[in-house]
Image (cartoon, rainbow, N blue to C red):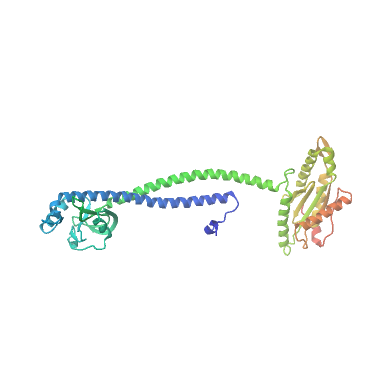
């Protein structure tokens, strides 16, 4: 399965279809880029907020450790320094911490010991609990800072005021001694809800700017491609005309005659039981044309062919098909025309050709033609059968003296109505 089958797109062989496909691809591309970019911008701005909250949390915790070192650390003779925060130290630490953090947007603080036990929290109900499966706490106890933004439906700040739908950055900061030994961890909740609208606004502004840039770029590209498409269509139209036109006479060539005649014959076949339509065919050959080329030159012969083509145009209806079959031979296809009506048209063509001389190389030449007439019948298997009978009629006209219309008999039965119907 190719990409067109996958997308269920039918691309026709014309520039407009390709242009429409380009527009669809551009719209889809813009939408994809906007969605991905919008999400990326949001993540980038959120990352800035998280990083800023992480840095602030780390600095706050370091300052707290330095300020409250006497309350947080205990030194027992013969043992290493450890975390304190027991009894009166807990009360004094809590009071000092709350006073220090009041100007900051901190809503909760926890302190863990090396055994992952909460030894202090601004929420007293949590003291004594062990957070065994907390991977982020494990990272902090391994000496790493771990920060993450989360949205909480309910929270309580340091003043015991209830908050709803808040964005907080949870930061785990290792508690270390001067010799970098980890004794525990701070868990600090920093309220970043105030940045929520700024993050969304920043992402929206950047996405909007990117959208405008993409629209301008694709719009300019569309105008360029559209201009190229117009030129391509014009070139394609000219090529199509060239492909079906005889370059000398300007009428249709043999290839188009056969193709169009096949279509008309198929239409006649479908209508046999309904309207009883038929396709008339006239083949003509210019009499003694080789003599013109030999005595007057090929330029004179070309002028004769062009003049005959013009007289053919003036002898038939606008929707009849005329074409150069080869050399000095021409074919006229008459849709919805009976045999008798085709004979009338053939006589008119012969008269128009002989009635007026043709100027060639400063001389006036009298040109005549031999014409053969046929009409489609139910026995015809293809257009060649119809043309073949017209060709035989043309050769019959030549053998009978030229400058006349002739035909050969066929298995087609002429209906009485044919002789009484006129198309002119």
The location of residue 130, given as percent across then percent down, is 21, 63
**Residue lying at 71% horizontally and 46% vertically, measured from the top left:** 245
Is residue 72 or residue 254 the one in the foreground? 72
Q: Quadrant of residue 360?
A: top right
Give left or right: position of 31 versus 6: left
The location of residue 28, given as percent across then percent down, is 47, 52
The location of residue 419, given as percent across then percent down, is 81, 58
List the single residue furthest toward the top.
362
Q: Is residue 103 visible?
A: no
Is residue 226 or residue 191 the one in the foreground? 191
Q: Is residue 138 visible?
A: yes
Give left or right: position of 327 versus 18: right
List the single residue furthest toward the bottom.
273
List the single residue furthest toward the front.
78
Q: Quadrant of residue 365?
A: top right
| Viewport quadrant of the N terminus | bottom right
Give left or right: position of 226 versus 331: left
Is residue 8 or residue 286 the one in the foreground? 8
The location of residue 154, given as percent across then percent down, is 25, 59
Vertical placement of 361 versus 213: above or below? Answer: above
**Residue lying at 40% horizontally and 47% vertically, measured from the top left:** 208
Give left or right: position of 89 versus 164: left
**Residue lying at 52% horizontally and 43% vertically, measured from the top left:** 223
Total labels: the figure holds: 0
């Amino acid at each position: 399965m190719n990409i067109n089958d996958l997308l269920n797109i039918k691309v026709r062989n014309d520039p407009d279809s390709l242009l429409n496909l380009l527009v669809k691809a551009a719209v889809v591309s813009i939408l994809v880029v906007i969605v991905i970019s919008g999400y990326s911008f949001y993540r980038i701005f959120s990352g800035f907020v998280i990083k800023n909250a992480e840095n602030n949390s780390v600095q706050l915790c370091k300052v707290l450790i330095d300020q409250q070192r006497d309350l947080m650390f205990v030194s027992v003779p013969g043992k290493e320094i450890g975390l304190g925060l027991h009894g009166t130290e807990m009360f004094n630490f809590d009071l000092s911490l709350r006073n220090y953090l009041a100007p900051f947007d901190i809503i909760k603080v926890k302190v863990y010991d090396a055994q992952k036990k909460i030894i202090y929290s601004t929420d007293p109900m949590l003291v004594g609990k062990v957070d065994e499966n907390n991977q982020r706490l494990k990272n902090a106890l391994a000496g790493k800072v771990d920060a993450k933004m989360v949205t909480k439906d309910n929270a309580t700040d340091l003043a015991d005021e209830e908050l709803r739908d808040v964005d907080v950055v949870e930061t785990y900061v290792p508690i270390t001694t001067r010799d970098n030994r980890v004794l525990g961890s701070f868990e600090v909740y920093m309220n970043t809800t105030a940045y929520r609208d700024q993050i969304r606004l920043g992402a929206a502004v950047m996405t909007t700017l990117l959208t405008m840039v993409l629209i301008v770029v694709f719009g300019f590209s569309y105008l360029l491609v559209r201009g190229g498409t117009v030129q391509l269509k014009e070139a394609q139209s000219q090529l199509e005309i060239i492909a079906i036109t005889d370059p000398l006479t300007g009428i249709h060539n043999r290839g188009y005659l056969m193709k169009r005649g096949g279509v008309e014959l198929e239409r006649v076949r479908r209508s046999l039981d309904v309207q009883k339509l038929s396709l008339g065919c006239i083949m003509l050959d210019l009499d003694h044309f080789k003599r013109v080329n030999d005595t007057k030159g090929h330029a004179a012969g070309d002028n004769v062919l062009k003049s005959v083509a013009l007289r053919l145009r003036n002898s038939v209806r606008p929707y009849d098909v005329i074409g150069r079959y080869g050399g000095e031979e021409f074919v006229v296809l008459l849709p919805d025309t009976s045999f008798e009506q085709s004979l009338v048209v053939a006589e008119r063509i012969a008269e128009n050709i002989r009635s007026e001389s043709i100027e060639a190389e400063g001389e006036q030449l009298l040109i005549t033609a031999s014409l053969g007439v046929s009409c489609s019948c139910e026995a015809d298997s293809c257009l060649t059968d119809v043309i073949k009978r017209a060709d035989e009629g043309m050769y019959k006209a030549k053998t009978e003296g030229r400058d006349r219309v002739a035909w050969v008999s066929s298995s087609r039965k002429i209906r009485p109505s044919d002789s009484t119907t006129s198309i002119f």
